[in-house]
Each structure stands twice: as C-alpha cells, then as structure tokens.
Image: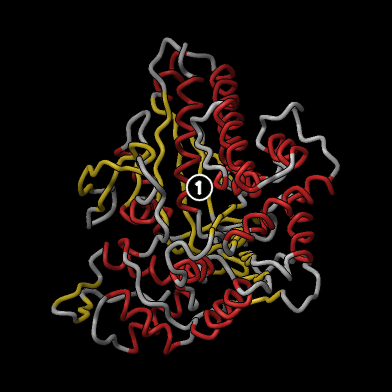
Amino acid sequence: MKEEYILHLTHGERRLVTVLFADVAGFTKISEQLDPEDVLSLINKLFEKLEMPIEKYDGTIDKYLGDGVMVIFGARPAHENAPEWDVRASMEMQEIAKEYFRNFPQKLGIKITINTGVVVAGYSGGKVKKSYTVIGDIVNVAKKMQDIADAGDVLVTETVKNFTSYLFDFEDIGLKFLAGREEPIHVYKLIGFRKGKEGELKAIKGKLIPLVGRSKELNILLNRKELAFSGKGQLVEITGEAGIGKSRMKLELKNSMAPGQANVYEGACINFGRIFLYWPFIEILRNIFEITPDDHKEAIRWKLSKQAEKLNLEIPTVEVLANLLGIGSAEEIIEEKMVIFNSILTLFDKLSQKKPLVLIFEDIHWIDEASLELLRFLAEKISTKRILMLCLHRPEFNPAFPEMGHITIIFLTPLSFPESRQFVKYLLGVEDVPDSFVEIIVQKSEGNPLFMEEIISSLAGQRYISIENRKLKILKKIETT
C-alpha cells in the first residue's frame, strides 16, 4: 500500500511570528509574452535582490511559490521585534522591486501582505523529507490578503498595525472579506515611517498596565541603581526569552528616576548591525553629542568640540571619538583597541562626575565582537564610578562578564497562573476573569506577557470576546489547540 504524504509537525511548538507574502503583480500577463526561460531568469534575479532585506532583518524564507515568496520573522530565532523588522523589510523590498522593474515596458511590481500571531512551528513532511515551517490561521490570512492587494501595496492586519503603529503610519482601508472566510478582517495599508519619536513600550492598544510578577526583580534593579548613583558602579544583566518583559524592566528603571537625576543613554544592538564595529557605542555617542541624521560633518565636529570643551577632554581622546563618529582624519577606525576602550571610559567617567550615568544596551545577543569586548572592559572599570550599565539579552547568550561583586544577573521567567490572571485583568480592564479563560491564555502563551497581549488582541479583533461594564463577555467558543 502506498504511503500517503501527510503534513505533520515534529516537536511542534507555539511561537509568536510575523508572516510575509510577496507576489509579483502582473506576472501572468508577462508570462504570456516572454519565453519561459526569460521569465524564470527575471523572477530569480528579483528574488536574489529581495533576499537582502529579508536576511538583513532576520527573516527566514519558508518557501518560494512560483512568482511569490513566503517569509517568516520571529520563528528562528524568536524575538519581540518581529512585526517591526517585517514591516521594515517590506519597505525595502518595495524599493528594490520599483528599481528593478523601472525600465520594464510592462507595468510590474510586487504586492506584500503581513500578519502576525501565534502559530505552531516545527518540521513538516513525510519520512523522506522534512522542512521547518509554521502552520496556522495566521498564515492563511496573510496569503489570502494577496487577493485584495495591488502592485506597490504593503497590506497588514490590525494586529500588525497595533504592534507597529508607534513607528509606522497606516491607512485604514476598512473591513475586507477574504476567500473562504465568513468574517471580514480589518486591513490597513502601510504609508511609511511616522514623524516623531518611537514609542517607549508597545503594550496592547498602546496601553501601559501595572507591572505584574516582577517586584522582586525590580527591587534588585532599583537597589543596584542606588548603589551606582552613590559611587559604587554596577552592571546588571537582565535575561529572558523574547517578550518576557526585559524592555518593561528598562522602562521601570527609567521611570524610577527624578527628572534630571541622571544622564541616560541607550545603544540598541540589532541583528543587521553585527558587521559594524562598535554599533551600540556609536549610537550612544551620537546621543551624547546630540547628533541628528541630518547633521553634516562640520556640524558633527562642532557639536563634538563644544561638548569636549565642557567635559575637559584632551585632544587625543576627542580624535578617537571623532573617528568613531566617522568625521576623523582616518577613513576607518584604525586605533589600537585599548586606545578606543580608554577613550570611551574617559568620556563616560567625565560624564559621571557631573551626574550619575545610566548606559542601557538592548539585545546584546546581537552585539558585534568589538562592542562585547568593550562592554567587558567597562564592566571591570566602573566599580568606583557613578555609572550603571544595564544589558538586556536572551538566555541562550552568555556575554561572559567577569565574576565581580558589582555585576548582577536577573533572570525573568514566565508568569505564574495567579500572575497571569492579574495580567489579563489589567490588560482587559475588567474586575475578574474566569479560570477557564485564563487557562486558555496561559496554555497558548506559556506565561509570556507579549504572547498574552497578542492572543487577547487577536481574540478581541476576531470578536471572540468583548468588554461591557468592566466585565468580560465570551462571545464564541475559543479553541484550546
């Protein structure tokens, strides 16, 4: 008897991912006009170019679909910025496609659709061949949205919009019926980057709820802050899975400080920044010297000189900083490593003498090797200075900081059932929630706060639940699988 090829998942696990579909609009018409080999060459060259932003923003190509491609963000590795990276990638993909098709006589372009939510991720296939993929309604919706997209469009679901509206503007194009679905979904068209600063925290519907289940960890962090501000410098690592609450702890730290109490500077490590030496430190330098993207070299040098004079920095130190900022006499960073390290330490020391200095390094699991060495160097040198260093990273990453009394590691774990209940109550703004509902949310999210936000937002968007007079109403049966 012939064995059937059955889709199944080996060691499947629930993941919050963002799925992107990109498809060439007008492909059918051009296929009729060109030789098949020419069509194949045209598509392959386009895909080669589109792979660059996909790789840059940590996306994984799940499969090619003729003239289209399915991409997953946030599955391997998981990260809470998947919706943002996906939208960023989509913008660059559209720019690449416009340039690629610019001189074609036919009107061609790509249409992109994006959805985010909880899926089952794992290896699918039969005994002979398996491949890593994700399955779930999230994928189906993103695929079917292609039917309502036009060339040049980036269409997203309400969930994607909610996760990324702190950074991007969208046009509401209303409720749309998709093939094979009884209920319409709310669809938005990407306009571009928002004007103004990025939001601090991407809580559901922009709502910042009270901190839940982290009082012990927060007390440790605030204690280390007080020690640092008194001249006993500290380094604190906060480690935990994507979405577990590392950024929220950072926000609580910042909110604990009185206005003007300390100088706070942040340097984010990003996956596509690993190839750039000292990326997070250069970002911090630009913040210290108030350098904007529009500043030309002379403006940057003037700002650097002005601040250096206030801090009484010596000329060799200023030249090293200038080279790091790309405005020095050298065309690249050529100084000896320890010269750079000591120059950065001197700058931070001078700043901390005026008022306490807080340095925040996010996502150091993506840090470049030079910056990691500099972090370790600083970790050993700050114990007698008014400096607090906060480093956020995933648990699989070990920065290997020296074992010293002023270095602390805080582990963030999933919320317990009682903590999850309180979290859900705050999130929904209700007086109480049934155990059965909390059990479903905990089962699907595994106690991860970000996953809980996404699941509840999805349930509300699909009208499974509603809130009336601060009471939760369950309108439809919620599947537990």
Vertical relation: 361 (above or below) 60 = below
Q: Nearer the viewer, residue 302 or 467?
A: 302
Q: Look at label 1 and name its amino acid.
A: Trp
Indicate the quadrant where residue 137 lies: bottom left
**Residue at image coords 62%, 62%:** 1
Camera sees residue 8 = yes
Q: Nearer the viewer, residue 7 or 286?
A: 286
Camera sees residue 3 = no
Residue 103, percent from left and from top? 47, 11
Q: Nearer the viewer, residue 396 or 349?
A: 349
Q: Which colour assignment does the render follow?
A: secondary structure
Residue 26, percent from left and from top? 39, 24
**Residue at image coords 23%, 57%:** 182
Mark 1: secondary structure: helix
**Residue at image coords 75%, 47%:** 343
Q: Nearer the viewer, residue 462 or 307?
A: 307
Question: Which residue is labeled 1 in the image?
Answer: 85
Residue 213, percent from left and from top? 47, 83
Quadrant in which the C terminus is drawn: bottom left
Dot 1, crowdedness within 10 Å: few (<14), some or many (≥20)?
many
Residue 133, percent from left and from top? 57, 55
**Residue at image coords 41%, 21%:** 108
